[in-house]
Amino acid sequence: TLLPVTDKQRLMARFDDWATDREVTIGKARAFAENPDLIGERFLGKYTLNTTSGTTGTPGIFVLDDRTMAVVSAMALRTLRAWLGFSDVVKFLADGRRMAMTFAPGHSATGVPAARFHKSASGRKRLLALSVHMPISEMVGRLNEFRPALFAPYASVARLLAGEQEAGWLNIRPVLMVLAAEGLPVDEYDRIAKVFGAKVETSYAATECPFLSYGCGERWLHVNSDWAVLEPVDTDYRPVPPGEQSHTVLLSNLANRVQPVLRYDLGDSIVQRPDPCPCGNPLPAIRVRGRSADVLTFPTEGGERVSIPPLAFEIDHIPGIELFQIVQTTATSLRVRLRLEAGVDPRRVRQSVVSEIVRLLNEHKLDHVRVEHADEPPEQSPGGKYRTVVPLNQVSE
């Protein structure tokens, strides 16, 4: 508490002062992040660079040093040891150690490792990386052909694929499914586990701290508190006792020394368990209340329904966009709210946005869905976040 609270907006505004390596500047970082040919490459030859979509109001660029990546690897092993028993490991090895994942294109926290795996011959054989922009039907075909032993989809994608598995279109039996990026109702995890006949586990992390936590069988998330500190706080940043829901949470990443993240307002509301978790894990246990898997569902002209996960609508890679929000106003219409960077041509950016969304809709045979521009800027949720996608049934919330 001797240190001040900070957040993404403040740190990004002082990017050059924030980095402890004087070679790391906002100019170099932005030039790197805007080059798609450099996805998966090392920034300045020595760092990992990730970008965020700006759901808390400001897009972010985060530089991770090798110390951080070493901790990421160590915590991944800790997590797998907690999740997999001996028989699970045997089955995973017998199934060829094939892994599949969904990723958000670009220099995202999932896009970078996917690109790095794909650039190695062994990685291409063992890892199937599926873009969240891919139509579900195509994803089903690729998964059926690859038959992963471990599958790490975004939670909203897993929910959609469970429906495909129930209908008989998808037929995979992974040993383990790891759902990340979004939260689902507790019964959804049980449904997905039953449909796929797999262990279903969860994790909660952030670009600012990729190794933050991992889930247990009691559906709690255990914080890797030897390398990360989470402080549940109220609106005045005063500590919230265990058992009570926080307004937000402050994160300190104890591994990264090139871009220190200390008492950083993560923007998520959490509840910390007041008593020991029944699973036996002694690490602090939390549940996150600030994320949800919002899927947009549309009727087709043939009377069917098509669902698209929210991350498929990420359009902030289009130059000139500072923040965006896509609101489903009717069953067949979308309203796009934009906050643009200074000095850009609004008409050009808006045309690019419409073209991108229309292309996505057409890929899903939804050319009858109307896309319109909004005069109002993106709006914050009561919890303070800018939700990038707002489904029809939640517009009034």
Image (cartoon, rainbow, N blue to C red):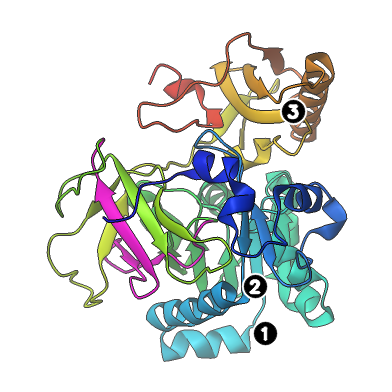
Q: Quadrant of residue 95?
A: bottom right
Q: Position of residue 183 (x, y in %)?
A: 42, 48
Q: Position of residue 159 (x, y in %)?
A: 51, 48
State which quarter of the image contains the N terminus: bottom left
Q: Position of residue 258 (x, y in %)?
A: 58, 66
Q: Is residue 324 left or right of residue 166?
A: right
Circle on res. 96: 1
Residue 173: in magenta span? no
Residue carrying label 2? 99
Type of amino acid under label 3: Ile
Q: CA distance from mark 3 to mark 2?
A: 30 Å
Q: Compared to 325, does 370 lie above or below? A: above
Q: Is residue 350 left or right of residue 311?
A: right
Type of amino acid under label 2: Met
Q: Compared to 343, does 246 lie above or below? A: below
Comparing 97 with 44, the one in front is 44
Q: CA distance from mark 1 to mark 3?
A: 38 Å
Residue 210: in magenta span? yes
Q: Compared to 93, does 289 lie above or below? A: above
Type of amino acid under label 1: Gly
Magenta part of the protein: which range? Answer: 208-235
State which quarter of the image contains the C terminus: top left
Mark 2 neighbour density, 10 Å: few (under 14) some (14–19) many (20 or more): many
Residue carrying label 3? 357
Mark 2 or mark 3, which is nearer the start of the sequence? Answer: 2
At 83% from the left and 72% from the top, the residue drawn is 119
Comparing 20 with 317, the one in front is 20
Marks 1, 3: nearer the viewer = 3
Marks 3, 2: nearer the viewer = 3
